[in-house]
Image (cartoon, rainbow, N blue to C red):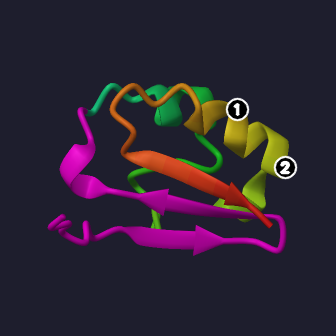
Amino acid sequence: MYMTKEKYKAYETDEIEVRFYAGRCEHAAECVKGLPAVFNVDNRPWIQPERASADEVAEVIERCPSGALQYTRK
């Protein structure tokens, strides 16, 4: 079975790793509307998971309809 390795950017804290797959993003803005302190396209980096609890970040990521945002708890 042939699998391609999809590129992503990772943003981490001690409790959670957030992965963003840009090629999947449908720009539904669930992340930006749901937790603007963490997901803000005007900031660099635009994802700053340290600005909220891991539970809050995970909850918003689970709303992402495209799967462009994913997370792993540490």
Quadrant of residue 28 within the rendered picture: top left
Q: Give whichever of 24, 43 is nearer the camera.
A: 24
- The answer to whether residue 7 is above or below residue 52 is below
Q: Nearer the viewer, residue 38 or 4?
A: 4
Indicate which label's residue lies in the foreground, 2 or 1: 1
Mark 1 secondary-structure assignment: helix
Which of the numbered marks, if any, corresponds to residue 53? 2
Residue for point 19% across, 53% down: 23
The residue located at (66%, 72%) in the rendering is 12
Mark 2 residue type: Ser
Residue 64 in the image: x percent, y percent? 46, 31
Residue type marked 1: Glu
64 to 54, vertically: above or below: above
Q: Which residue is painted at 77% across and 38% down in the image?
A: 56
- Figure quadrant of the C terminus: bottom right
Q: Quadrant of the N terminus?
A: bottom left
Magenta range = 1-26
- Left or right position of 71 against 33: right
Residue 47 showing in the rendered view: no
> Residue 54 lies in magenta, yes or no?
no
Q: Position of residue 50 (x, y in %)?
A: 75, 63
On screen, 68 above or below 21? Answer: above
Q: In the picture provided, is 12 more to the left or to the right than 9?
A: right
Disc 2/disc 1 C-alpha distance (Å): 10 Å
The residue at the point 33 percent across, 32 percent down is 66
Q: Is residue 3 magenta?
A: yes
- Name the residue beneath numbered marker 1: 59
Give the secondary structure at mark 2: loop
Mark toward the start of the polypeptide (2 vs 1): 2
Q: Is residue 47 left or right of residue 23?
A: right
